[in-house]
Amino acid sequence: MNLQIPTNSKRLLMVYIVIFLWIFFASLMYFNINDINNFKSLSIYFVSLTGFIMSYIWGESFRKSGKTTMFKMEYSSKREKLTYIIITLWTIVGIFSIIKPLPLVNISTYFGALTPFVGSYIIGETYNKSDK
């Protein structure tokens, strides 16, 4: 099986990244299960990322940005940059919370509370692109 990294489809690339993170976090959790965190709390943590990813994929489906992906050395859209910033923060905090251990359910609530703000910005950028 020859699995190519999709550089021409931002949506598919995003799905691949989330699946990779899902596998990575499951592996990390397997070796760090404790009284605070388990696979149930990890699944709740992933739900906190869902709103960001859904709004980005919907926005990219509704109106393609016309710019290249961030992984090419060219310009990318504001929606994409913001989404990858959130994913990076989410990943760093998640890794720290599993290793430390800190309650993932509490951190899930924190990221879930951010979802309406970032999601509405991404949807707003889709409907009415702001100036540079």
Image: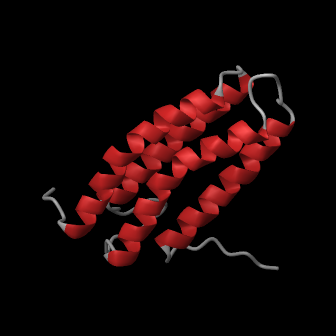
In the rendered view, tell whether residue 64 sits above or below residue 95.
Answer: below
Q: Position of residue 66 (x, y in %)?
A: 31, 75
80 or 8, nearer to the observer: 80
- Let me know if residue 68 appears in the view: no
Q: Residue drawn at (66%, 33%), measured in percent from left and top?
A: 95
In the rendered view, tell whether residue 61 sits above or below residue 41.
Answer: below
> Would you identify the image quadrant in which residue 42 lies?
top right
> Would you identify the image quadrant in which residue 91 lies?
top right
Q: Position of residue 24 (x, y in %)?
A: 74, 47
Q: Residue drawn at (32%, 57%), measured in percent from left and top?
A: 122
Q: Residue drawn at (78%, 34%), measured in percent from left and top?
A: 38
Left of 17 or right of it: where is 28?
Answer: right
- Let me know if residue 59 appears in the view: yes
> Would you identify the image quadrant in which residue 36 lies?
top right
Q: Position of residue 30 (x, y in %)?
A: 85, 38
49 or 70, nearer to the observer: 49
130 or 104, nearer to the observer: 104
Q: How is the image coloured?
A: secondary structure
Left of 11 or right of it: where is 1?
Answer: right
